[in-house]
Amino acid sequence: MPSLQNVSKIPSHLCCIISLNKYSTMQKLMLLLLICFGTSFAACAQKTPPAAVVTTFNQKFQNVQELEWGKEKNGEWEAEFEQGGADMSANFSAEGKWLETETEIKVADLPASVQTALVGKKVKEAAKILRADGSTVYEAEVNHKDLIYDVSGKLLSQGKD
């Protein structure tokens, strides 16, 4: 055990380990289990959207399969699901406002103007996005980037996948 004169030289993360020596193995195990349980509980909590989000989702989408929820970095809630054989996702604000719905489509189903804009590019996936303002845009994943086009084929934005 280090002397009191050298305590200031011990890294702080090791002080915790040194101070745990006074506890029995069972107590250490219980502490570890509590930490693990608390961490997993917090992780699960992030997968459960607020009631307002669930209510709006249920009003807008019926007969869905394989529903999974996730919280995005910007605070929005995203539901990923299948409906009518199509892979879809819908985004909602934390207050429950529907923001957009993305439906995966075949590259060949993109509007001709968007396909023309993509000539020479290898498109991995494509989607049609209906936004809350009523507009429709199209997404094409190219080289791990999401390219967003309007119906005329104008590139609106590009971001990382």
Image (tube, rainbow, N blue to C red):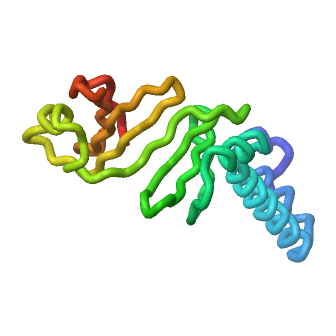
Q: Residue at x 73, y 32 (%)?
A: 95
Query: In which image quadrant can residue 118 be found?
Result: top left
Q: Is residue 66 left or right of residue 95?
A: left
Q: Residue at x 54, y 53 (%)?
A: 80
- The C terminus, quarter of image: top left
Q: Residue at x 30, y 27 (%)?
A: 150
Outermost residue toward the bottom in this view:
26
Q: Residue at x 21, y 47 (%)?
A: 123
- The N terminus, quarter of image: bottom right
Give the image location of residue 4, x and y in percent: 86, 45
Q: Up-down: is 19 above or below 153? A: below
Q: Is residue 66 visible?
A: yes
Query: In which image quadrant can residue 98 be found?
Result: top right
Q: Up-down: is 99 above or below 105? A: above
Q: Is residue 16 left or right of residue 115?
A: right
Q: Up-down: is 23 above or below 43? A: below
